[in-house]
Image: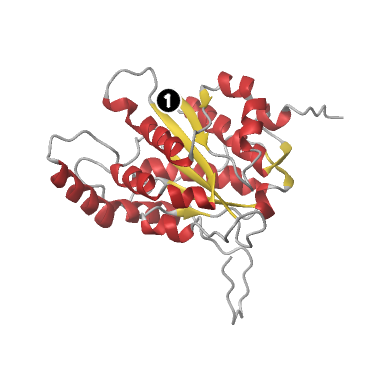
């Protein structure tokens, strides 16, 4: 009989583990570092945000997992508010610009509920247009409360992310918190965009037995997308502020958002789960 422990959800690298959506987000930060190390990269992770349902237990889960986070160079700093947390996560993408770091990159995760996404519109837009680092990446986890069960108003963050040209991933189950989370960091690195990530109580507060193989999912980098001179990631510029702003706008509108789309196509993130040879009705969910 196989020995099963409570630590498996954070240390297992094969087989299956039982965890909830919150714990899957914690595991995501550990697995990303493991995958990077296997690729010869020395990376670290950074998490900051502000608690609120359905992500009210994420900070507690991160504190409890501190020994595992430390072992994988993942730093958790709760935000004073959502905007300061988002600004700190944005800053992780700029460490390589100074040339004074031991890491090849730092991947960052921001979390907050719907009103926090409202508050962070300015930070998110500047973050997204400025860009991510090629060995970093940003995942913005929005705890949405569509029915206003624990909020003063219903929230659906898709529209706010879209207004800032931020692509959005929407996990439908606990395992996708891990697989789409890994795809989110990879998409962010490739496209230079921050990537939104919708978390609902229906999934993040549920539990499941999931695949623990750290080599899954397989990441496919598009080879048919033309990357412009200078690349898609953040960079230093000697141009005036106005010129920089116009260049960032052009890069976003002409390349970055399409790079995210190319990544989605290459990895079949939008795929048919149930097919029929005589289908007359299609359901998108």
Which residue carries the number 1 mark?
41
Q: Is residue 61 above or below residue 225?
A: above
The one nearer the camera, 278 or 211, is 211
For this view, does 177 lie left or right of residue 189?
Answer: right
Residue 282 image offset from top left, x and y in percent: 58, 75
Quadrant position of residue 42: top left
**What x and y, as percent, mark residue 240?**
12, 40
Please tell me whether mark 1 sits on a helix, a strand or a loop.
loop
Where residue 262 sits, quadrant-wise, is bottom left
**Residue in the image at 13% along x and 46% along y:** 243
In x, y percent, where is residue 12?
A: 68, 29
- The answer to whether one can see residue 142 in this image is yes
Mark 1 residue crowding within 10 angstroms, few (<14) / some (14–19) / many (20+) = some
Q: Give percent across and percent down for residue 140.
A: 48, 45
Asked whether residue 218 appears in the rendered view, the answer is no
Q: How many marks?
A: 1
* Image position of 187 (left or right of 65): left
Q: Residue at x 56, y 69 (%)?
A: 284
Left or right position of 54 against 16:
left
Q: Is residue 18 above or below residue 284?
A: above
94 lies left or right of 210: left
């Amino acid at each position: 009989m196989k020995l099963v422990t409570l630590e498996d959800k954070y240390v297992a690298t094969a087989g299956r583990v039982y965890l909830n959506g919150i714990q899957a987000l914690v595991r995501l930060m550990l697995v990303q570092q493991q995958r990077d190390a296997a690729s010869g990269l020395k990376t670290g992770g950074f998490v900051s945000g502000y608690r609120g349902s359905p992500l009210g237990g994420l900070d507690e889960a991160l504190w409890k997992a501190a020994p595992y986070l430390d072992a994988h160079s993942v730093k958790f700093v709760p935000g004073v508010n959502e905007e300061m947390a988002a600004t700190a996560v944005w800053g992780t993408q700029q460490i390589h610009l100074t040339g004074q770091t031991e890491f090849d990159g730092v991947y960052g995760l921001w979390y907050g509920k719907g009103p926090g996404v409202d508050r962070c519109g300015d930070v998110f837009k500047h973050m997204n247009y400025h860009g991510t680092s090629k060995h970093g990446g940003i995942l913005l986890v929005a705890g949405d409360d569509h029915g206003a069960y624990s909020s003063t108003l219903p929230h659906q963050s898709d529209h706010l992310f879209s207004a800032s040209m931020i692509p959005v991933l929407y996990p439908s189950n606990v395992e996708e918190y891990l697989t789409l989370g890994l795809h989110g960091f990879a998409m962010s690195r490739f496209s230079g965009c921050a990537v939104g990530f919708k978390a609902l109580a229906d999934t993040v507060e549920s539990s499941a037995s999931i695949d623990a193989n750290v080599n899954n999912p397989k990441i496919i980098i598009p080879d048919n997308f033309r990357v412009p001179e200078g690349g898609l990631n953040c960079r230093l510029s000697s141009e005036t502020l106005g010129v920089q702003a116009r260049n960032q706008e052009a890069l976003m509108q002409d390349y970055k958002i399409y790079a995210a789309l190319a990544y989605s196509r290459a990895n079949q993130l939008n795929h048919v789960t149930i097919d029929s040879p005589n289908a007359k009705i299609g359901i998108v969910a």
